[in-house]
Image (cartoon, rainbow, N blue to C red):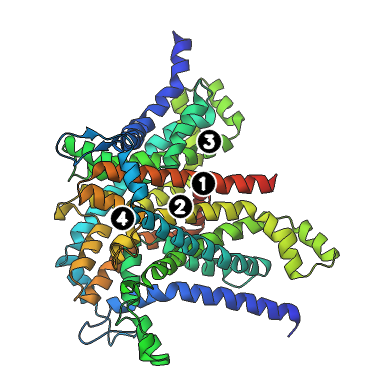
Amino acid sequence: MTAARRTDAWNAAILVSFAAITVLPIVGIVLLSLQSGHGPVSGFELPDRLHFENYARAFEAAHFASYLKSSLIVSSAVVAGTVVVSTLAGYAFGTMRFAGENFLFYLLLTGLLIPFEAVIVPLYVELRAGNLTNTYWSVILPLIGVNSAFGTFWMRAYFRSVPRQLLEAGAMDGAGSFRILWQVLLPGARPALLTLVVLVFMWSWNEFLLPLVMLSREDLRTAPLGLAFFAGRYTMDLVGMAAAAVMVALPVVVLFVATHRRFVHGMWVGALKQ
Amino acid sequence: MRGRGRAALPYLYLVPAFLFFVPFVLVPFAHTVGLSFYDWDGLTRASFVGIENYREAFGSRLVRSAFGHALVLILYFGVLPVLLALPLAVSSARTSVPGGNALRALIFMPQAISTVVVGVCWGWILALDGPLNAAIRALGPDWAAVDWLGSFTWALPSLGIVGAWTLLGLCVALFFAGLQQIPASLYDAAAVDGANRWREFRAVTLPGLEGPIAVALTVTVISALRAFDLVFVTTRGGPGTETVVPGILIYRRAFEDGRLGSAAAIAVILSIVVFAVTLLINRIADRRAA
């Protein structure tokens, strides 16, 4: 074996072992979720057979059907709202010149830096005064607010990358600015929009502090919130808890596997935003 | 008339975004700053107390230890993944490992998983009768098995390792993307100069990765400062106050103890630390790049 090929093998071995270490806990919890639950489960063991009834139990008896439904409603609404407002604002910041442009843009960018912990207390007080706590709105509206900062930043970058001739040609045809956006620009924006959808869906699905504070009614709980309460209370039903955990993680993991290139790239740009 | 309508047009496109951003992010943030100068239980009349909440916060051992724990978490969430991700990204970028993209995607996956799920999963692994201790008992002495998250010594480092686990993949992805931007000619020049791998790393790779390293540190340090979900789900700040972090204090004081002003003051201090850290890391990166 030559020296170069030996380094290649080393490099591959390092990467494979880190990937293995990373997935080991995930594999462990999936295996746990399929155990019978009778007798102690202490290690990473293969179950005697696949006990999918753990999932049925978590879904029905532990109300995860309702929690997953709540999460789906909240996340879909946040994605829809964020995509619309960010596209409109990103279009203005990316293609138009106007007084106060920089000020308004940087004002919006502060939203990327403000930690949610720093708005949660007055947000709760205000939404309670408006009788909005214990409604999905109390989670949806603030999440659109926070995500519109990143969304606008993201869509502005896309609209800036569009060749100017395309905009001018549209204007020459006498199309109004909204028609240029709708008919000329949006068809090409599909990849950028899809990345935004995936990221905002993930951030909303996984949000914990906001629903924890806003939703005290059991039937409104989102999936991560339901799991946190389940884990706090039913520590006896270890396999049921594992099944619930897998169900909570699954939607975003599936989305991640389907779009991981886009996902990683978006997170990268998302990280650069800071 | 027409001209004026056109001048107003850009603002019309901004209205929807600001309609969500201003009332649900900006105004509450301003209120947090205002509230931090009041004593308020959330129900009765608030009374102005000046900087008393800040005085209390800076004097409180609990608040100081919460920020101290956040500093420790920075080492685990930020420094450790960056140090591990560097060789990992470099080794997998210089040679084409078959399935490299898929392997890096696997390492990235914890980023996509809800922190609550991560907490539940690791809570099981680190439990006294969990798989980690089962492995330790099988390989070594029984006394080496520890209730990791319940131990005064090990709870905080254990949470740190979990954070490192979730953030490693993000760092690898950032560095891998950064490495693609370094021109191959720089490596050729280093080879001509007879540089060995270490010299090449110091002279070409590391300078080329300054931007991505700054980004990775910013993201990971902020997630260490803001570690609320993981702590809330696993230890709730315990045992004792060993894993109390600023987010936990804000939550407890506001929603359990009815001390909203004090919670707001801690939130303001946390925000200032987050702003300062972001500014500092990017300043250093900019200066070194210049």
Task: Look at the image and tell me in which quarter the N terminus of chain B lies.
Answer: top left
Q: Are marks 3 and 4 on the same chain?
A: no
State the CA–CA distance, disc 4 to disc 2: 15 Å
State the CA–CA distance, disc 2 to disc 3: 29 Å
- Label whose residue precedes the other's in the sequence (4 or 2): 2
Q: Position of residue A165 (x, y in %)?
A: 61, 29
Q: Chain of mark 1?
A: B
State the CA–CA distance, disc 3 to disc 4: 40 Å
Front label number (2 vs 3): 2
Name the amino acid type tagged 3. Answer: Phe
| Above or below: residue B40 compared with residue B92 | above
Q: Which residue is mark 3?
A: A159
B84 or B88: which is nearer to us? B84
Q: Which residue is mark 4?
A: B248
Name the amino acid type tagged 2. Answer: Ile
- Label whose residue precedes the other's in the sequence (2 or 1): 2
Res A122 quadrant in image = top left
Secondary structure of the residue carrying numbered label 1: helix
- Label whose residue precedes the other's in the sequence (4 or 1): 4
Q: Residue placed at 21% from the left, 73% from the top?
A: A235
Q: Are marks 2 and 1 on the same chain?
A: yes
State the CA–CA distance, disc 3 to disc 1: 27 Å
Name the amino acid type tagged 4. Answer: Ile
Q: Which residue is mark 2?
A: B222
Q: Position of residue A36 (x, y in %)?
A: 23, 83
Q: Which mark is residue B209?
A: none
Front label number (3 vs 1): 1
Q: Is residue A60 left or right of residue A151?
A: left
Q: Are marks 4 and 2 on the same chain?
A: yes
Secondary structure of the residue carrying numbered label 4: helix
Name the amino acid type tagged 1. Answer: Thr
Front label number (3 vs 4): 4
